[in-house]
Image: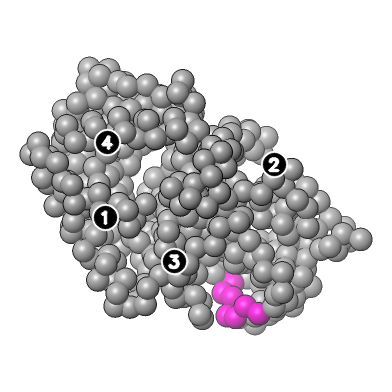
Amino acid sequence: MHPLGHRTTAEHDGAHPSSEPARPGPGLWHAKARVRRARSPLRDDLDVDVAIIGGGFSGLWTAYHLLSADPALRVVVVERDVIGFGASGRNGGWLMAAAPANLRVWERQFGLKAVQRAQAVFIDAVGEVAQVVSIQDIDCGLRLAGGAVTVARSPAEVKRLMDRHDEMVRTGWPAEGMAWLEPDAVAEQVGAQGTLGALAVRPCGTLNPVALVRGLAEAVEQLGGRVFERTSAVSIEPGVVRCEGAELHAAHVVVATEAFTVQQSGEGRRYLPLASTMIATAPLPAGVRAEIGWSGGEAVGDAHHLFFYAQHTPQGRIAIGGRGAPYRLGSALAVEGVADGATSARLEATLREVWPQAESVPIEHRWSGSLAVPRDWCASCGVDADTGIAWIGGYAGHGVAASFVLARSLALQLRGIADPDGPMPWTLHRPRQWEPEPLRWMASQAIVRVLASSDRKESHGGHARRARLVHRFTG
C-alpha cells in the first residue's frame, strides 16, 4: 500500500470561494492583479495524507509535485492570508538558476562534484518551470530570452564580477551561458548608463510572481488538491494541524512558511527574517521606453554589496528592489509590507542614476517583504521520520525557481521514494540555528553598516577589503 494512503474521487472537490473579495497583499504585483473572490477558510475537520501550511511557492510546488505523481493523494494547503501574501508575491520576479546556498558550505560537506551536480539541477529548473507555465497555461508574463545582466559601476565591481564568473564556472555553470558586455553593449541592451560593463548570464527569466503563484494554486486544485485561504495554523503537532475552528489530521505535515516560520513556537532561531524593499514606477511614456530599450525581459542587477535587482515589466514599468532595511530586534516581520524609507530612497536614487531617461517618471508603488535566511545561507528540506513533520525553505531571496526544485525533492521524500538522481545537498544539509538575541540583532546592524560603507568607498574608486569578512559570515 502507498505509504501516504489514497482517497476517493468524491474527496477531490476544492474549497468553495466565498462572496468576499480577497484582500490583496502589498506591492505592485498584488495591486495590478485581477480582483477575485477569496477561497473559503477551513471550517470542518479533515483527514488527509499531506497537510501543507503556507500558500506560497514552496507549499504549492510541493502540492503540485505530489499530485502530479499521484492524483489519488489527499493534499490540502492552508494559507493564513491570501495566496502569495508573503515573499512569493512581493519579490522581484526573477526566475533564476542560482543555487539558494553558500556553495562553499555545500562543497566542504559534500565535495565539488556534488555542488556541480546540484547547480545543474537548478539550471534545468528554469526551463522546467517554464514548461509548467506553458502546460498549465499560466499567464504570468514569463520572458526567458534576455537572461540576467549584472552591471558593474566601479572598478571593484568589475573585479567582483570577473571573480564571480570564474567561481560560477568552477562550480558548474556552463561557460557558454555567460558573456562580458562592454558599456556600449550594456546601454544598448538594457539602457543602463554609467556602467563599466556587465556580466550576462543565461538562463534567467522575469515574470509576475503573483500571477505565477495564483496560477499554481489553480493548477493544484485542478489536480485534485484543496486550497483554503484565511486559515491560520494555531498549532502544529505530529499528525495534526489545529486551525481556527477546525483541524487537519494528516500522515505528514509540511511547514512551508518561509520567514513566517519564526513566529511558530520554538522556531524563532531557525531563520533570520531580512526585509527587502521594492519600488515601481508608473508606466514609462512611449518615448522613454524607446530611449531605454530594454525590451528583452532581462533581469538587471548590480554588483554592489547592497545590490539592486530590477525588471522592466511588459506594462512598461521599472520595478527595482534591494536590501538594506534594518533587521528588527526579535525577528519582527514586514507583515504589512510598508517600505523602509531610507532603502526606498536609495533605490529611487539608483534608478535615476542607472536609467536617467526615466528621471521624470513618478514612483507609484513602494513595498517590502521578509525573506528567510538560514544561519549558513543554505536552503533545505526534509521530513522528520519520528513525527512526520516536514520543512522546506530558507532561500535567502532565491526562491522563485529554487522552490520548484526543493519541493520536488520533498515530494519524493513524502512519498517514500528515493531521488533517482541521488541524494542532494539540500536534503542532506541541516543548517544550525541563529544566535540568540541580542547577538543576531547586533551582528545584522554591523553587517548592513559595513556593506553600505563599502559601497560608498568603492563608488569613489576604492576597494573595501573589510567587506570580505562580512561575506564570509553572510555567504
Residue contact at pointers 2 and 1, CB within 8 angstroms: no
Q: Residue at x 21, y 63 (%)?
A: 446
Q: Residues within 10 Å of mark 3 (few under 14, many from 20)?
A: many
Q: Earlier in the sequence, mark 4 or mark 2?
A: 4
Element carrying mark 4 = helix
Label ID, residue 271: 3
Q: Is residue 186 visible?
A: yes
Image-quadrant location for residue 229: bottom right
Q: Amino acid at mark 2?
A: Asp
Q: Amino acid at mark 1?
A: Val
Image location of residue 441, percent across then percent down: 28, 71
**Residue identified by numbered label 1:** 470
The CA span between labels 4 and 2 is: 33 Å
Q: Amino acid at mark 3?
A: Tyr
Q: Earlier in the sequence, mark 1 or mark 3?
A: 3
**Residue identified by numbered label 4:** 160
- The magenta segment is 229-237
Say whether residue 201 is magenta: no
In the picture provided, is 272 more to the left or to the right than 411? left
Element carrying mark 3 = loop
Question: What is the tally of numbered marks visible in this picture?
Answer: 4
Q: Residue at x 67, y 69 (%)?
A: 384
**Residue identified by numbered label 2:** 421
Q: Nearer the viewer, mark 4 or mark 3?
A: 4
Q: Residue at x 33, y 57 (%)?
A: 473
Image location of residue 138, percent across then percent down: 59, 39
